[in-house]
Image (tube, rainbow, N blue to C red):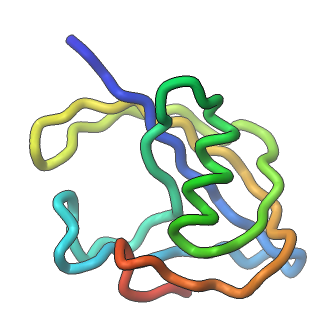
Amino acid sequence: MTHKLAVKGIIRRNDGKILIVKRSKNDDHLPGVWETVGGTVEEGATPEEALIREIMEEVGLDVEVGELFNVFNFTKDNGEKKIGITFLCNYLSRDVMLSEEHSDFQ
């Protein structure tokens, strides 16, 4: 059984608020669901590098990846199996700019 590695980031501001994003209604996995930012780790990247890239691509923020929060596994709607790693992240700069993967944020 082959699993791909995914990463998620709980992005915290100094006031303690965290960022959540809503999946696009056209997403191939859980469309319309609220989640934290993340994605797949590409070959040759560390989980931390992948998370920084995914956060920049999906919401346009600069973050500092911090401590490990949890490890989980899941199966996408298409049957693909993944192992996920969630990190706590500190917001550094920029305003949220959503990619087409998400339709809203709070």
Residue drawn 21% across and 68% down? 27
Residue 92, position as x, y percentages in the image? 86, 70
Q: Nearer the viewer, residue 63 or 69?
A: 63
* Quadrant (top left/top right/bottom left/bottom right) for the C terminus: bottom right
Residue drawn 17% across and 60% down? 28
Residue 82, position as x, y percentages in the image? 33, 32
Q: Nearer the viewer, residue 3 or 46?
A: 46
- Where residue 95 sits, quadrant-wise, is bottom right
Total marks in image: 0
Q: Is residue 38 above or below residue 83?
A: below
Q: In this rendering, would 46 be left or right of 38?
A: right
Q: In this rendering, would 31 be left or right of 9?
A: left
Q: Nearer the viewer, residue 53 or 72?
A: 53
Q: Is residue 101 above or below residue 43?
A: below
Residue 25, position as x, y percentages in the image? 20, 79
- Where residue 10 sits, quadrant-wise, is bottom right
Q: Residue furthest front?
A: 44
Residue drawn 63% across and 84% down? 96
Q: Is residue 26 above or below residue 4?
A: below
Q: Residue furthest top?
A: 1
Residue 63, position as x, y percentages in the image? 78, 61
Q: In this rendering, would 99 be left or right of 27?
A: right
Q: Residue furthest left?
A: 78
Residue drawn 63% across and 65% down? 56
- Where residue 64 sits, quadrant-wise, is bottom right
* Quadrant (top left/top right/bottom left/bottom right) for the N terminus: top left
